[in-house]
Image (cartoon, grey):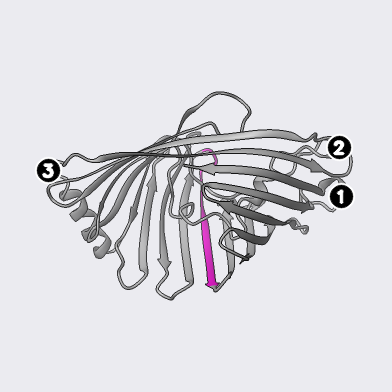
Amino acid sequence: MNNFKKIGLTALAASLVSVSANAGALTASGSASMNMEGHTGTGLNAPTTFSMANSVTMTGSGEMDNGLTVSVSFEMDQGTSNNSSLGFDSHSVTVSSDTLGTLTLAGHGGNSATTAIDTTAAGDMWDNFDGLIVLGGTTIADAAIGSGGTNDSLFYTSPDLMDGLNFTLSYDPQNELTTAGGNSGEVGYGINYSGVEGLSVSYATVDINDHSTNAAGDNTVMKASYAYGPVTVSYSEMEHDEGLSSGANDTTITSYAISYTISDELSVTYGAETSDRGDVTVDAEVEGIKVSYTTGGMTISANSMSIENGNYTTAAAEDADYWKLGASFAF
């Protein structure tokens, strides 16, 4: 860590000592969605299903006498399972200053330097196929390479060093001091630039010390997007190095998306992803299109996606299609 970063973090920590906070405000927000979805494919028996997802987020903030702002946030999230349980999900405590930056203690898998970058350019397309059992009983591979467990983590975002340029630091011990058989510890950093109108560029890397395999690997993410008028183009590349000599699970995911805003209410997005794993010669590929219509706090959407070589083989049974009709509400 260079001296500049040390000074910034030290000053932020020191300013927390012996201060009081003024009364703050508490706000509530949330979302709810209803979906009908299904899969089709060779020999695939996956019936049409209905699902719901609900979440409520409570956020409170107040300003200290020294000018720092302290915020507390927690989310109650049902997820997408069809049950009535509603449990705590993401929660965090944040201390921020215009001149010192933002320090966040996040729980339940808070952001790392890499996961702070919005997944892939095409979004979480792979989530719609992860774990899908196809003909022959095989399961479509999980192509996700993001990190972040359920432990608390520290995340720091600097103020702008120049117009649109800042950096991030993250630390998640995840039982880092345990012996072999424990979880993984993560240390990462990222750089973000948005100083040109319409352009956003991010790069981040996280070093992972995996005690279950005694391996030191890393995750690296690069993403760029540019918006011009109604068109937005995005590209991302994610690399996972497991740190093992075999390299069998080392993965690279490249992704791109093109979005066109037809009107204030209507938009269309096309996206594609390719996953290259280890020394396998066949790449898994996903592509899809989404149409969204928003009016007020309600969004109606239709998705159509397909996957080829889902388990990194060319067998027809590893191909599948996915569709979803949904309505979501924000309040």
Image position of 195 with respect to 108: above or below: below
Q: Is residue 180 visible?
A: no
User: Is the C-beta separation of discs 2 and 3 under 8 Å?
Assistant: no
Going from N to C along the chain, the mark reached first, 3 or 1, is 3
The label on residue 19 is 3
Going from N to C along the chain, the mark reached first, 2 or 3, is 3
The amino acid type found where label 3 is placed reads Val
Separation of disc 3 and disc 1 at Cα? 64 Å
Residue occupying image coordinates x 66% and y 43%? 326
Q: Is residue 272 magenta?
A: no
Magenta segment: 212-227
Image coords of residue 26 (percent x, y): 30, 38
Q: Nearer the viewer, residue 197 or 294?
A: 294
The residue identified by callout 2 is 136
Image coords of residue 149 (percent x, y): 48, 39
The amino acid type found where label 2 is placed reads Gly
Residue occupying image coordinates x 85% and y 38%? 44
Q: Quadrant of residue 60?
A: top left
Separation of disc 2 and disc 3 at Cα? 64 Å
The residue identified by callout 1 is 315
Separation of disc 1 and disc 2 at Cα? 11 Å
User: Is the C-beta separation of discs 1 and 2 under 8 Å?
Assistant: yes
Residue occupying image coordinates x 43% and y 76%? 196
Image position of 75 with respect to 253: above or below: above
**Which numbered mark, 2 or 3, is in the foreground of this view?**
3
Image coords of residue 18 (percent x, y): 10, 42
| Apparent side of residue 53 relative to residue 30 in the rendered image (left or right) | right
User: Is the C-beta separation of discs 3 and 1 under 8 Å?
Assistant: no
The amino acid type found where label 1 is placed reads Ala
Residue occupying image coordinates x 77% and y 52%? 306
